[in-house]
Amino acid sequence: MADVLTEKQRSYCMSRIRGRDTGPELTLRRAVWAEGLRYRVRNRLKGRPDIVFASARVAVFVDGCFWHGCPAHSVKPKTRAAFWAEKIDRNKARDTEIRTVLRREGWTVLRFWEHEIEGALLRVVARVRATVEKGMARNQP
């Protein structure tokens, strides 16, 4: 099926998609905060993690199913398929590079799909809590 929007309209719609403070990201931040875990969202780490627990050296990323190619939920666009396939492949490669760099610098990296946050929030929060507590114990003198 052809796109019902003009190229200019589609470009405008796509430009309005947020890169930060997305619904799943805000949901996770609220839940983690309610658990008593304190974090930072503004940071200078490579890849700009969505949530950072600096003292535990834990970086958390919330990945959108479409933008990062979720194997369960990613839908391949019918228009400009080659462009989107290349873009999503670049995103995946960048995710891998960022994880490698942060781990090399001593950070623990957690990545969650948006559908995990929407469907299993308590499990995600429990994993974040356990990882932060483990990081705190490891970094104490």
Image (cartoon, rainbow, N blue to C red):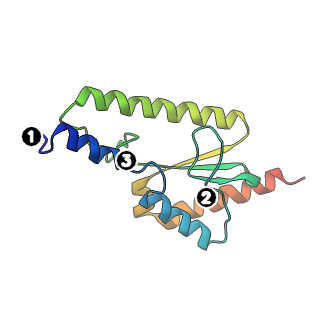
Residue sticking out furthest to the left: 1
SS at mark 3? Answer: loop
The kind of residue on which mark 3 rests is: Cys
Name the element at disc 1: loop
Q: Earlier in the sequence, mark 1 or mark 2?
A: 1
- Residue 71 in percent (x, y) is at 35, 42
Image location (x, y in percent) of residue 100: 62, 32
Picture quadrant where residue 22 is located: bottom left
In the rendered structure, the answer to whether residue 120 lies left or right of residue 101 reads: left
Q: Residue at horizontal 69%, vertical 57%?
A: 132
Sequence-first disc among 1 and 3: 1
What label sits on residue 128 in the rendered view? 2
Question: Tag on residue 34?
Answer: none
The residue depicted at 66 percent of the width and 60 percent of the height is: 39
**Badge 2 density bin: few <14, some 14–19, many ≥20, Cα 10 Å:** many
Contact, CB < 8 Å: mark 2 with mark 3? no
- 120 lies left or right of 57: left
Q: Which mark is residue 65?
A: 3
Amino acid of disc 2:
Val
